[in-house]
Amino acid sequence: MADQRRTERLDQPRAPRGLRLPRIDAETFGRWSEGIARGMGTANFIVYMTLVIAAWFAWNTLAPENLRFDPYTFTFLTLVLSLQASYAAPLILLAQNRQADRDRIALEEDRRRATMQKADTEYLAREIAALRIALGEVATRDFLRSELARLAEELDEAAERRRKLERRQQEREARRQAGGEPLDEPRDDLDGDFAHDGRFDG
């Protein structure tokens, strides 16, 4: 005993003494309590308990006296129901606490997702605003349509003038082949354009 006291150190906590209770897995016990509470909250439990109590009353009232195990005032039945209530209340509270913990975790997860969605929405809103500003500096559809229409008209006019020049050149070539002298015709804009093209040198 003296040797044991000498080996004890003051800088270390003393080992706990006394009765050690068995350790119970909280998760397993919680699932078990939830199962019981869920079963007690069903219509089947109420119906079965009602049938048992009715049979208890009938047996201890109508059966012969020597076979009645809980005569009138039903003391034993009262004790059983009291024990059931005393155990049911903590089990229901435990199940409610576990459900509250799950609800809290789900609420935190929903809040985190809502925060992420809000951040994503704000980012998309900023991107859309930037795109609108960028598109404001780009040519609009009506402007492009008007420019394309103007270019198409200019191309049609140029093609028409080219056809007229080619037709006039063909007429002059036909007169030359017939042996006639080409008449001096006043030059107009079409002749000038034709000369610039290099097809006619008048």
Image (cartoon, rainbow, N blue to C red):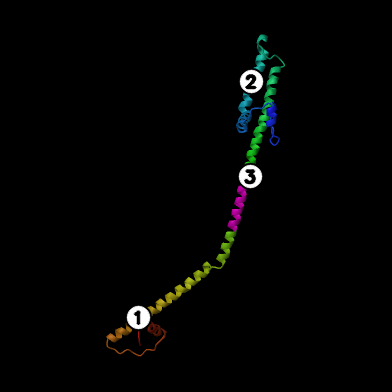
Instruction: Look at label 3 and name its amino acid.
Output: Glu
Q: Which residue is mark 1?
A: 167
Q: Are marks 2 and 1 in contact (CB under 8 Å)?
A: no
N-terminal label among 2 and 1: 2
Q: Residue at x 59, y 56 (%)?
A: 123
Across and down, in percent, residue 51 comes to 63, 21
- In the foreground, 30 or 12: 12
Label 2 residue SS? helix
Q: Which residue is mark 2?
A: 52
Q: Locate residue 179: give its quadrant.
A: bottom left
Which of discs 2 and 3 lies nearer the camera? The answer is 3
Check residue 111 in the rendering and tell me which mark sits there, or answer none: none
In this image, 199 relative to 146: left or right? left
Q: Categorize mark 3 by other alpha carbons within 10 Å: few (<14), some (14-19), many (20+).
A: few
In this image, 83 relative to 196: left or right? right
Q: Residue at x 47, y 71 (%)?
A: 148
The N terminus lies in quadrant: top right
Check residue 108 in the rendering and tell me which mark sits there, or answer none: 3
Q: Categorize mark 2 by other alpha carbons within 10 Å: few (<14), some (14-19), many (20+).
A: few
Q: Categorize mark 1 by other alpha carbons within 10 Å: few (<14), some (14-19), many (20+).
A: few
Q: Is residue 159 above or below residue 51?
A: below
Q: Is residue 196 visible?
A: yes
Using the numbered discs, state the Cα–Cα distance from disc 2 to disc 1 in whole angstroms: 117 Å
Which of discs 2 and 1 lies nearer the camera? The answer is 2
Instruction: Look at label 2 and name its amino acid.
Output: Val
Asked whether residue 122 is drawn in magenta, I would say yes
Q: Is residue 15 visible?
A: no
Span shown in magenta: 111-125
Examine the residues drawn in magenta and state their main secondary structure: helix
Asked whether residue 127 is drawn in magenta, I would say no
Label 1 residue SS? helix
